[in-house]
Image (cartoon, rainbow, N blue to C red):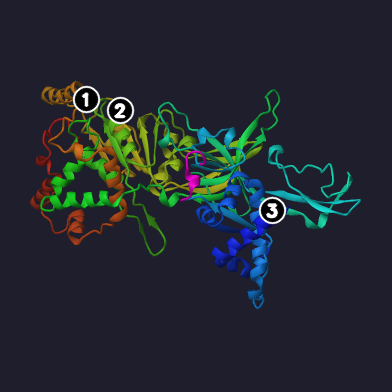
Amino acid sequence: MEDNSGAGKALAGFLIKYHSKQLDSIIISPDARIHYPLHIDFAELMDEYPHLANLIFSQPIEYLSIFDESAIWAQKVMFEDFKKFENASVKPYVHVRINVFGSPLESPETFPSIGRVRVKHRGILLTLKGTVIRSGAVKMIEGEKIYECRICKHRFKVHPEVETGNSIPKPTFCPSQNCESTRFQIVEDNKICHDYQEIKIQESTQVLGVRAIPRSIPVILKDDLVDIVKAGDDVIVTGVLTAKWSSDMKGVRCDLDPVLIANHVRRMNELKSGIDIPDDVILKFKQFWSEFKDAPLKGRNAILRGICPQVFGLFTVKLAVALTLIGGVQHVDASGTKVRGESHLLLVGDPGTGKSQFLKFAAKLSNRSVITTGLGSTSAGLTVTAVKDGGEWMLEAGALVLADGGLCCIDEFDSMRVHDRATIHEAMEQQTISVAKAGLVTTLSTRTIVFGATNPKGHYDPDQSLSVNTTLSGPLLSRFDIVLVLLDTKNPEWDAVVSSHILSEQAEPGKDNSDENLTNIWPLPLLRRYIHFVKGYFRPVLTKEAEKFLTGNGIDAKQERLIVEKLSCIDEFPGINMGEGEPVA
């Protein structure tokens, strides 16, 4: 007990020294019934008290509660300076939240992937990263009961056990010394309740290896942590790994399931598309464009040669993929109406024209992507599903919600059922999904780029409309900003060029066969960084000349043709024949 008392005083001194501003705001807050968070950095604590930091890491259940009591003691020390404030008081419900970012706890042993969580991680301060796929309702549970011994009148707290479904066990002996009583009574006037919520996080598919299945783990949120994340959010959760008995079901063995009791939750939504770009890489981008300052379209073409290099030609499609991934600029008018900045791309083409190759390469270029097929996608799988878990309805995120802030690729778009296609109308234009299922009414964010690929219905007829050729409805087609049609024109000369390209790639796979087209300068990691660089560092503005071109005012047909030829710049891209095998926009 003396060690715990000394640790509590040391931790209180640490809070007063480094986090006095947070304590000030808590003391002068008017409502004493609210649970207040007190955020600290583990790296800061480790520099000041390395021994205590090690104890919090190795014995978090015991020392985190001591840390919370230290926050109350620190308030009492500082309260003398706030007596003149009318609503100032010492708040009884303060929880210390430990941020491990930038500390030694970011090592693989204490920051494993969800699929690598083992028994050895139980009982230590553990950090997991994942995507919220299920969010339960906020409940109220009894946090602790205060019992009084009938013999010695000693009062003590009994906390709920997570292993047994948050039930509070009845004490069997008196914790005070020299008392062997087994009779107790509950003190009813001190009942303490807590907000309680269960979510489930799943590891990102981007970090998984081949043939790996993404794993998930339940997370328990309490008090000030409840309701701060929704399905589709990327989070980093720090907490204590424990286990609880699975729900009773007839004929099913009752097992212990791992569960993480959260102490700190960090939302990563604002960093979803974040890719670390060193200064030397940014300098390399600037040097590249300084070389092409007199011929910027040549520099653009040099970059596009690195997009899907295994597909020969198709310059227009590569340009469309790049522009779609970079996106536009979101506009919000005075009334608050938002005009989306993300673009959507649809490829319509005959089999064997490389549609799926472009989809897969685009998914690699995006830091956050989800790939699905139309045949295996339902409306619930794309949007959100209502599932029942333990007698309670929860929402589980679908593909569009999980791809929020990234890219959702849907192959074989034509194989989707008509009803399932209609569900993505709101997600593509309004960038939200409104849900009203099983009594759960909410709106989820889907700021997602949709990249679709579909086959035409039979042989593509240029005389018919796109809606007739694809069996896609007009409202759905109108939501795609770029629609490209890829036709197999059955030209022997073009087939010979393409087959020669494929055979040359197969003959010497280890050799870079594209020295003249600068593919070696723009490998996949550099392309990903460049796309993120362009999206984050530039905000283009529409010029008056561009407005005239878009509206067609003040530009005759000859000028328009010259501008289009200049922008296309096909002669700068060797080996291209726009007449054969190229897309028809």
Q: Which residue is mark 1?
A: 509
| Residue name at image x 78 percent, y 42 percent | 169
The foreground one among 209 and 369 is 209
| Residue name at image x 10 percent, y 54 percent | 556
Judge whether residue 159 can be spotted in this image: yes
The label on residue 457 is 2
* Magenta span dominant secondary structure: loop
Left or right: residue 515 compared with residue 186: left
Tag 3: residue type?
Answer: Asn
Left or right: residue 157 compared with residue 62: right
| Residue name at image x 66 percent, y 52 percent | 65
Question: Is 59 above or below relative to 85?
Answer: above
Q: Which residue is mark 3?
A: 4
| Residue name at image x 90 percent, y 51 percent | 150
Please say if the residues under marks 2 and 3 sit with CB atoms less than 8 Å apart.
Answer: no
Q: Nearer the viewer, mark 3 or mark 1?
A: 3
